[in-house]
Amino acid sequence: MIRLIETVRIRDGSAPLWYLHLRRLATSCKALGIPLPGELLTPAGGPDRVHRLEVGRAGVEITERPLGGLASVRLVTSSVPHRPYPHKTTDRGQFDRALTEARASGADDALLLTPGGAYLAECAVWALFWWEDGRVCTPALELGILPSVARARVAELAGGGGLRERRVGVDGVRGRALFLGNAARGLVPVASLDREEVPEAAETSVLARRFWA
């Protein structure tokens, strides 16, 4: 049975993005007909870690795990086509296959493309962003991209200019500064894409520091 997932970062004893997780969870529960748990306590206290919720018709299961992390990520484009993933559920077969393929090639994560390789979609683990003319860009939600918590947070930080949604292929981002977002691990730069070095942008570090504020 499909269940919804929320992976919540506990940082310095609090969950700074909890409100975004709750908002997405409520939206997905309504869309999929899954009862929203009535009493979800805000996770807090203890060491830095990941607080994971699985929510289904039978209730909620909570687990915790130590925090993993990477200073930067090596990406490869995947042969696994991206299928719409509008809600974060346990039905993650496409991402598991793509990640296995990427790690077998020595990369950290896989970048999935829409069928036929037309457009960038999302990574197996991370949401994708890049800088274009001083603005943060990301694949369009209309492509079936997960409305991730990291994406929602970056949109808040983007300010008046907003987060620019783009339909672009791999060649459209080559030579640009890429970075990735994850609600558990924050924002990290992409070190390489298909073994080609990716340029760095000072703006990424600034945004990463603000992510948890």
Image: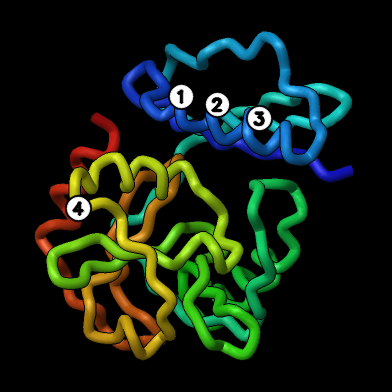
User: Which residue is labeled 3 in the image?
Assistant: 53
Rounded to the nearest whole Å, what is the CA distance between mark 4 and mark 3?
Answer: 33 Å
**In-image side of 72 versus 148 (left or right):** left
Separation (CA) of disc 4 from disc 1: 23 Å
The residue type indicated by label 3 comes to: Leu
Dot 2 and dot 1 residues touching (CB under 8 Å): yes
Q: Residue at x 46, y 68 (%)?
A: 108
Tell me the CA gap for discs 1 and 3.
Answer: 14 Å
Q: How is the image coloured?
A: rainbow
Res. 61 image quadrant = top right
Q: Amino acid at mark 1?
A: Tyr
Which structural element holds mark 3?
strand
**Mark before the other along the chain sequence, 4 or 1:** 1
Q: Nearer the viewer, mark 4 or mark 3?
A: 4
The residue shown at (23%, 85%) is: 175
The quadrant of the picture occupied by the N terminus is: top right
Q: Secondary structure at mark 4?
A: helix
Q: Which residue is mark 4?
A: 161
Q: Residue at x 13, y 48 (%)?
A: 206
